[in-house]
Image (cartoon, grey):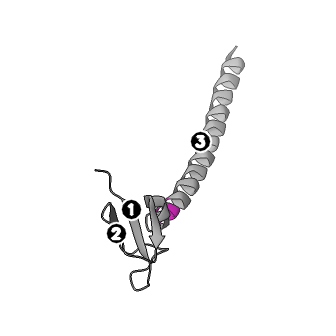
Amino acid sequence: MFKKENKKSQGLSINFIIIAAISLIVLIVLIAIFTGRIGKTAENLESCWLRGGKCSEDPCGDNYAEIKNTKECPPDGDKYCCVEVLT
């Protein structure tokens, strides 16, 4: 009678160890995914196109705002990042 109870308690601890190991693996994978995404998001914030703008060789018109320091349109270059302003 006592042997069955001991087996159940051992089975429970083995199940706990397996669940903890799987949880740890999932946590590591999630950290790796989000760490990589954060780096890409920071790069995308510098993109003119992802901000909804267009690179133009001409200065921005009246209905457009100029965004400086974008990846595609550097400030020292001859291109402007123009984003349409909603009025």
What's the CA distance linking mark 2 and mark 3? 47 Å
- Label for residue 43? none
Q: Position of residue 71 (x, y in %)?
A: 47, 74
Q: Is residue 17 above or below residue 4?
A: below
Residue under the image location 34 percent in, 67 percent down: 61
Q: Position of residue 85 (x, y in %)?
A: 32, 56
- Choose the circle earlier in sequence order: 2 or 3: 3
Label 1 amino acid? Val
Residue under pointer 3:
23
From the image, state whether disc 1 or disc 3 is nearer to you.
1
Q: Is residue 10 left or right of residue 40?
A: right
Q: Is residue 24 above or below residue 15?
A: below
What's the CA distance linking mark 1 and mark 2? 6 Å
Residue under pointer 2:
66
Q: Is residue 19 above or below residue 87?
A: above
Label 2 amino acid? Glu
- Choose the circle earlier in sequence order: 1 or 3: 3
Residue in front for this viewpoint, 35 or 50: 50
Residue under pointer 1:
83
User: Does the CB distance between marks 1 and 2 fall below 8 Å?
Assistant: yes
Q: Which residues are magenta?
A: 38-42
Dot 2 alpha-carbon crowd within 10 angstroms: few under 14, some 14 to 19, many 20 or more: some
